[in-house]
Image (cartoon, grey):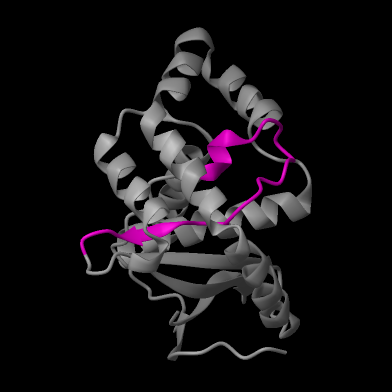
Amino acid sequence: MQQPEGDLRYEALVRSGRLDDGELMAQLGHDVARNYLNPDELALVFDDLAAPEVAAYLRTNKFPADIKVRHGDFGEIVTAGLYRRVRRWCVPILKLRYKQTPNQAVQGTDVLAFRFRQTPPVIAVPEVKTRAYRDRRMSKEAYDSLEKVLVRLDESLYFAMVRCSERGHQFLVRHLARLLRNPENRVVERHMVFVHDDHAWSEARGSGCGP
């Protein structure tokens, strides 16, 4: 297997004890909802339907029934929240909102995270693998998937730029356009994030290596 160049870092994130069960579920519920629906869509649903009907609408039209898809989506949701809130990266696109059907796998990078104000700007490309148990084979799967994704990175950047333009976020559009125009003036970090269950608690293990 080809070995990546640059620094290799490893970090294990485990239960910290700072959130009780209720707080954890509320935070995860918020993240799951915002990844599948934008606020405007959710407001429209609530205007038209009563609470039980809203739940039925979400189960039918937004939340996947396939267990493998549910695992994969959950891992991406946790990862996006980790990069945004803990690592303080800019994560402008929640790609699960753009599924045409609940069980569809969205193409491209699992998550795109940016540090636009660094010189040169940095793009983190996390490949997320989610399992119900620890499995050492995930690292090989993640590495192979990440290499394929990086070949088509500009397609994911263009997708993000168009979505930001649709939402009127011109600041982000300008930065993404520069990254597309000047690929030599950007740093791409390869990240692998592993999410699995450990004694009924999710433990995320992440590692990143330089460009």
Q: Is the magenta stretch mostly helix, strand or loop?
A: loop
Residue in view at x 50 percent, y 32 percent: 37
The picture places residue 133, in percent across and down from the top left corner, at 71, 75
Q: Is residue 95 magenta?
A: yes
The picture places residue 151, in percent across and down from the top left corner, at 61, 64
Q: Does the magenta stretch include residue 202?
A: no
The image quarter in which residue 120 lies: bottom left
**Residue sitting nearer the eye, 19 or 163:** 163
Q: Eyeballing the image, is 193 above or below 176?
A: below
The number of numbered badges drawn on the structure is: 0
The picture places residue 103, in percent across and down from the top left corner, at 74, 40
**Residue sitting nearer the eye, 67 or 116:** 116
In what quadrant of the picture does the N terminus appear? bottom right
Residue 77 can be seen in this image: yes
Magenta-drawn segment: 94-117
Residue in view at x 32 percent, y 51 percent: 178
**Residue sitting nearer the eye, 85 or 184:** 184
In what quadrant of the picture does the C terminus appear? bottom left
Residue in view at x 33 percent, y 69 percent: 18
Q: In this view, does 8 lie to the left or right of 170?
A: right
**Residue sitting nearer the eye, 77 or 90:** 90
Residue 29 can be seen in this image: no
Q: Is residue 97 left or right of residue 165?
A: right
Q: Is residue 10 left or right of residue 70?
A: left
The picture places residue 78, in percent across and down from the top left corner, at 50, 59
